[in-house]
Image (spheres, rainbow, N blue to C red):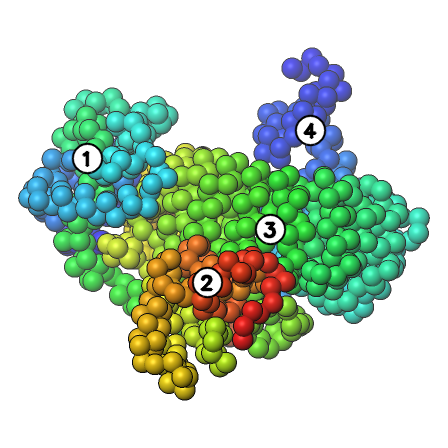
Amino acid sequence: MNYFPDEVLEHVFDFVASHRDRNAVSLVCRLWHRVERLSRQRVFVGNCYALSPEILIARFPGLKSLTLKGKPHFADFNLVPHDWGGYVQPWIEALSNSRIGLEELRLKRMVVSDESLELLSRSLANFKSLVLVSCEGFTTVGLAAIAANCRFLRELDLQENEIDDHSGHWLSCFPDSCTSLISLNFACLKGEINLAALERLVARSPNLRSLRLNRAVPLETLQNILMRAPQLVDLGTGSYIHDPDSETYNKLKHTILKCKSIRNLSGFLEVAPRCLPAIYPICLNLTSLNLSYAAGIHGSELVKLIRRCAKLQRLWILDCIGDKGLEVVASTCKELQELRVFPSDVLGVGHAAVTENGLVAISAGCPKLHSLLYFCQQMTNAALIVVAKNCPNFIRFRLCILEPTKPDPVTMQPLDDGFGAIVQSCKHLRRLSLSGLLTDRVFLYIGMYAEQLEMLSVAFAGDSDKGMLYVLNGCKKLRKLEIRDCPYGDKALLTDVGKYETMRSLWMSSCEVTLGGCKTLAKEMPRLNVEIINEHDQMEIGSEEQRVEKMYLYRTLVGPRKDAPEFVWTL
Amino acid sequence: MEGSAGNHEVCPQFLDFVPKEREWLVNRDGQRRHGPSEEKELELRLGPPGNQDWSMRDSARKNPGDKSESLLSLGYFSSMSSMTQNISNGSQTQMFSASKNPVGAVISSSCSSSAYGYRGKTQHNQQQTKVPSFLQLNSPLQGLPVMTQEASQRCCTEAVDIQSAEKKAFSPSSATTAVPNSSQKRTAPGPVVGWPPVRSFRKNLASSSSSKPAPVSQNGVPDKVTSRTPVETCRKGLFVKINMDGLPIGRKVDLKAYDSYEKLSSAVDELFRGLIAAQKDSCPAGIQNKQEEEKALTGLLDSSGEYTLVYEDNEGDRMLVGDVPWHMFISTVKRLRVLKRSELSALSLGSSKQEKVRH
């Protein structure tokens, strides 16, 4: 291979697309490392604190697309204090000072300021695509900067961000010359939108394929938009409320008939169920349906809708669909690959929305299912065993029984065997989230069988350090482990310290690890950042035996971060 | 899972084995001699799910009568598994995998690396190359080969037996585990921070679009009123109007108070029987009529009575009560009406422009 000119190698590497494969390629020899890094265009950084922008820029001068993730996953559930970190500003500054012609930036759980967005929009001339997921810290002013300055913008995708709405003007900031939009998603914006500007923007964007509106966009505007953009592939409705006897609604019915390309449907943040029949004609073409925000659609209407969606591959719904509704899904959606059932009432644990029966029905009817997120009232071992047998292809299996430590209600046993069956049967399982009453035994099974497991989420489970150790010892491919409210202490933490350098990160909160244990770990492993989050000033520097409420450790090339707030101690 | 004091010697040793295989081998021999029966049960429980019929288990297992118990408990889910074509009614089928040797299959298909250095122990058949060492460590030798030959029909019973065997040894020990405090902490009731694991973005949306008067959250999600119908979610009462032909005054019923059509029917019967009687009293018709009326109300749901029950659904259509499952009915019903059966043909059922025939 040494005798090939670099261009040939590069050409071969063009076919190697996935990050992991390219990372592997770069480890073969110096020559390959060089060719690979010079030709690499897409880089994925799973933890923004694992390296510095300078290192990234130095290694990959041809960088075009960067994905960055900031806060730990449990930040989604308010377990990480607000200003813990994850700022994108240093990255954008470094990129703007470099010669890198970045075209795409994808951020998850990062803090993005208006200033960052402004800098980005002004310094990266060729910028085309901005995707922000679960980010915060910016307002519509930042969006206005992006709209105004990124001349070749193709994609602006805002998913579930916390955005302060100052005005709906930002949409008007797209210049008239901007005709390159392919994807626009502002569903998470809470405020008003300049509707006329929106319609004009859509009218001058012939390549628009994906459009997701926010709550402020009424049905009339949707009608106008669809008239102008029948080529849409992905549609997220805004407010879907109207009088079904009205002229507008009738027009909508006819307009939708022309939208034969729609494959993804979402939205319905506000919905009048009597208007749903308008979308029936496109249901048969849908491969992805997200009704998880549509609290206004009841069980029977949901079922009526889903009965028409025979080609669905991905379905996100609320648990008000019920077990019976899931049976309908099972009998209708034979191509289903991903299912997410969200709780419609997170506060009221008590009424049986979905149970193990719904999941069993799905597993029986949908053999291609490989990704599951299921919030339910209860689960039994027997059901999990059946599911494991019916669906051995799970890649992601996330089960959340709403009541913590709830046992199998039929046998009153822990759910060890049920989850054990899942990991035993699903040999390609990469992600697992546990819930319910669980002992150390489930972790024994996980350590034994879950050979491909990369991410494990544990809450209120296990009896002793053994549980955590089974997992650390057994799961060779483990990258992320997040644990809360489990009885794991220093012994579990310190038995195999080398393991953490093979992982991206470990989160432990409300466990039994002590300050002394964390300090020991930090001392032995200098290439880890062991962060203690001391939110309410509970901890004193000194007493080693005190329990650490929140610990987050991750491997890094660049040592303790300099932007840590006061309540975060890096040991 | 701490069990007896003897276990404490066991635990640290097998935890150390991972980096040092040799040590493990040495330990293993030592392990075998530790053997309070409770520990053996502990060991058995450390096996993989579906692992069946370790010979030690026979002592732990109760009389064969148990088996029928476990079969019965499997029958529980066979009723819901009419769609799970692999489960037969006899519930003697396997639950883990279709192959006869579920665990064996797992083992043999795993990588054959000799990392665990176990091949030397020939007493096991070669299928156990990859069984992780801590399993070998703790299981009695003779147990595993039996497992692989065992018919899979035992598999499911074993799964339940694991639980029943465990119940004996496990629960007492769990009560004495080293961390009672955290288990108490873990089972503390009441709202827990960050639980259930739902993004706050989603939580706020769910609460702002529900009918209860949700305050504006700290995220400033606007408290917009949606076009939700007055028929609400399960927790509250579901009161719908019910009118009857011939009666000027209607009633209201709480549909949440019933869980079936039969109960609703008898409730309606009770509701109106008295009213009709009162009505009839004021009419010139005699007592005989009243009795007929009373009887007629009992045939609401089938074609036997003089009256029939219809409802108006969320699309404005008038529908016959009883066609759809109860919960579906509940979610679409807006109002009820008791009609004279003779009026049925005069109405066009299902029309949304239906006028009220009689008040």
Are there few (<14), some (14-19), or many (20+) residues within 10 Å of tag 2? Answer: few
> Could you tell me which secondary element the residue under label 1 belongs to?
helix
Report which residue position mark 4 lands on: A36
Q: How far apart are marks 1 and 3 (CA)?
A: 42 Å
Tell me which corner region of the image, top left, top right, bottom left or bottom right, holds residue B141. top left
Q: Are marks 3 and 2 in contact (CB under 8 Å)?
A: no
Mark 4, mark 2: which one is toward the viewer? 2
Q: Write the residue at 79% across / 64% down.
A: A193
Type of amino acid under label 1:
Arg
Q: Which chain carries label 4?
A: A
Side of B95 where B216 appears, left or right: right
Type of amino acid under label 2:
Ser
Res A169 visible = yes
Type of amino acid under label 3:
Asn
Tell me which corner region of the image, top left, top right, bottom left or bottom right, holds residue A19. top right
Q: Residue B235 carries which label?
A: none
Q: Which mark is residue A290?
A: 3
Are there few (<14), some (14-19), or many (20+) residues within 10 Å of tag 4? Answer: many
Same chain letter for marks 3 and 4? yes
- A307 or B111: nearer the eye? A307
B213, above or below A428, in the image: below
Q: Distance between the residues labelled 4 and 2?
A: 84 Å
Type of amino acid under label 4:
Glu
Report which residue position mark 2 lands on: B342
Q: Do the residues labelled 4 and 2 touch (CB within 8 Å)?
A: no
Res A542 visible = no
Q: Write the residue at 74% across / 67% down.
A: A191
Q: Are marks 1 and 3 in contact (CB under 8 Å)?
A: no
Q: Mark 1 lies on which chain?
A: B
- A534 or A208: nearer the eye? A208
Report which residue position mark 1 lands on: B154
